[in-house]
Image (spheres, coloured by chain):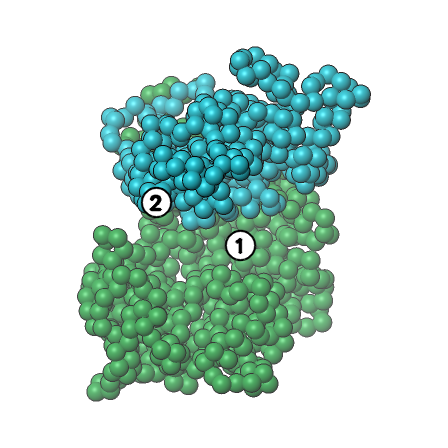
Amino acid sequence: MTASDSTAPVLTDTRAAWSVPAWLPWLLRRLLVGLATVFAITIIVFAATQALPSDPARVILGPEATEQAVAVLRGQLGLDRPLPIQYAHWLGDALRLDFGRSLDSDVEAVAIVRDRFGNSLVLMLLVLAVTVPLSLLLGVALAVRRDSRLDRIAMAGLILFKALPGFILAIGLILIFATNILPVLPAVSLLDPQRSPLAQPSYLVLPTVTLVLSILPFLVRLVRAGVIEVLEADYVAAARLRGLSERRLLWRHAVPNALVPTVQGIAMTARVLLGGAVIVEVVFSYPGLGSALNSAIEMRDIPVIQAITLLQAALVVLVNLVADIATVLLTPRLRTAARPTLKPGSRAAWKLSGGGT
Amino acid sequence: MPAEFAIGPASAPLLRVEGLRVSLTGARADIVSDIGFTLRPGEIVGLVGESGSGKSTIAAALLGHARKGAVITGGRVILDDLDILSAEASALRDLRGARVAHVPQDPGAALNPMLRIGAHLDEVLDVHAPGMTPDQRVERVVAVMADVGLPPDPAFRQRFPHQLSGGQQQRVLLALAFLLRPRLVVLDEPTTALDVVTKAQVLETVRHLCRRQGAGALYVSHDLSVVRDLVDRLVVLYAGRVVETAASHTLFAEPRHPYTRGLLAAMPDIAVRRHLLAVPGHAAAPAARGEGCPFRSRCAVTTDRCLDLPPWQEQGRGHGVACHHPVSGSLAVAVEQTGPAAGTGGREPLLSVRGATARYGKQVVLSGVDLDLHAGECTALVGASGSGKTTLARAIMGLGEDVAGTLLLDGVAQGLREGLRGTAQRRRIQYIFQNPSRALNPRQKVGDILGAVARHFLPLDRGQTAACVAATLAKVALPASAADRFPAELSGGEQQRVAIARALICEPDLLICDEITSALDVSVQAAIVELLRGLQQEGLTLLFVTHDLALVRSIADRVVVLNAGAIVEQGAAGPLLDCPHHPYTRSLIAASGRAVAS
């Protein structure tokens, strides 16, 4: 990608003696904090589901059952014990990935979640695999051509897509590609649960395209703003006056520095996809995690609700962790510090800067 | 346009600039126009002007570059036989960094934070000398590192820019510039961000390298005192035009242009205490310059002839001036005969600090500092960067973190944290920051900024507040109309006056000034210093934090020298500056004295 790859850097021998990286203690601390966060989330999930105006025993037995029968079942389910004890039992089971049986369909809650999560993960990874390289390329291309006619038209188009709600996009795509105009794709994603979603690509196209289109504007604008900012930095101006080509300035100086905010932007996109794909899943009847949670809440299916919310929360923690680690590793100033401190509110700032300029 | 001239034997010039013009894109306004000068091989020429005069624009144009929003619209820049302004893009790239090198202003921002020092050097060699063998490269790099005074070992080249001090970063930039032994080096205020000791060392390195490599150099600066001893010749710039050019010693001895004379009169001198004379007014922005002599609105000797653009006049021996009324004779500056009031014996100090210690993490910034400030006196707190002077000043203000010690104001103990002080206590000590544009809320009008402070401390109604604001603005020599302006509409000097007004409106007993003139032009600095001296005569006590010892001579009654968090010397300003006892004080004075020891 860069012209410098061909020449061996003789002056920077990176094969220096290996030593414990300065950020290792930070990483361990960060991991512990992540675990503690997940633990705190288990308490919140448990408490929140307890607060739901619903009695599992009543749900299981139905409205016809006598109060006595319900009370007996409550005893059998352990619902009459003190909350901390119920929580301890629940947590112990959850650690063994046992969330009990679904109240609605009488299969293991984990089994439902596993299938649905697999579908969601495939969709999310597909979307990211398309969006990330595309937004990098588009963002850099627009940054280089900033304020040109092309840039202005592209930015206006991106704002238009950003402003459209996901379901409008979805419906528009269905109208174009799945009805009379150009009927090449299925309007609903009725995946065969026996086979991998990847073996049924035609069902994946429209959900993927919808999500890509709704996320791309944010990331493109983030990359564009980041690259423009770096291209106007003093060190790029100084490097230009040392006779470096624009190509080298872009790929060796500007893009690596612009990657740092992009990493946080990608993480934010991943977090949005984890929770926010519900609408797209509903429109396309895509059997993902979001629609599973939606129907579980409708049915007051507490074991499934607990399993999904806990999974989503843990994934958000994981995504943040990975993004923070990547940020530290990508930033020499943080990498070489014993106590890297990501700027407070930096995620929010990046979010804002992605919308600016 | 200044004609060509030569001193002594007519050697072929290395660089010839003729009729250079750089304009703003869009607007029909020139940032610089009719710029002409020559530079001989091995010569160092100083390009001096205040902020906005276009000196950085000229520096970039010498490499065929114009910043965003500007475009080179005319003239020629000829290096040896090549016209840089008409060179192809690829020829320009080959030229930059190899035959003409540029040293940028802010070392902290001019190095890529992602790249190691070695990678920066590597890259220049990759681009300009791809034929060199690895051994030759290492040899060249080691040699240039030694030349600029950096450790030549590989471990140092493994470092990232943020792991270096400001002085080291600037030396890396010098190494990058001198790596390929360029014919011409353009230095754009390379020492502005450095403290006085580092500045002197870097200047020494620049001089040494130019002599050694026989490179010509253009040294851009806003500060005449910095270039005085470094350069052979000076080009003085005003509002985008060359107003005077002469050999360095001639220019200092017999300045002809009223503006040059004004600049020199505004310059503080470490050797003598004197009033600093400001040049009134400020330079117009490119679009508002109008016809005729650009300096006429600020000039004391202006006549109707100045409505025409003054022609370039040779004054002999390479001395040229663009003025209808060049002034002759040496510059007479009024040296103050009366020394500062030094008698402080017996009086109780206004403020006493006892055993102040401060730490930043594990690092000790202040170790047991005792300091007395007497009412009506101006005490200068001096030291190189990192000496702890700002930490001490902030501790007195109550802005310190991790500070311990005793602070007595009129014998009454004060909390070391702002939060521990009552409103009345806070009112008595006020602080002015270095950078006025960052110290003023950009979304509030000046009147609101000042009014909020006034109402906080004094029981005033709306009308009284307005009157109070107007009176305070008058005290800092700003028109009452300034109250309706936003800070961004004011010049740097005016902004600093607003910051001073904000402090004065509290009617404080002690004013702490933290490097308040270091971001300002010399002539603006002179006006601010005179303003502070006037306030001091009305009874205000000043603590003046600075690393500029020449300025100390002009304003301070007492000097306290801080090094590595401890006071190494203190006393009345005159005697201390004339015969310093501590080696550290001597090194500070030697570093700033370089400018006058000609």
Q: CA distance from mark 2 to mark 1?
A: 84 Å
Q: Which amino acid type corresponds to the residue marked 1 in the rendered image?
A: Val
Q: On what subunit does the disc labeled 2 rest?
A: A
Chain A: drawing colour: cyan
Supply the letter of whichever chain is green: B
Residue A207 seen by the camera: yes
Q: Chain of mark 1?
A: B
Q: The C terminus of chain A appears in which quarter of the rendering? A: top right
The image shows residue B78 at horizontal and vertical percentages of 59, 38
What residue is pinned by disc 2?
Answer: A83
Q: Which mark is residue B235?
A: 1
Occupied quadrant, residue B537: bottom left
Name the residue located 40 percent from the left edge and 35 percent from the top edge. A73
Residue A95 placement (x, y as % from top left) = 33, 30
Whether residue B147 is visible here, answered yes or no, is no
Q: Label 1's element?
A: strand
Is residue B373 toward the left or the right of residue B282 in the image? left
Q: Amino acid at mark 2?
A: Leu
Residue in the image at 69% along x and 19% along y = A186
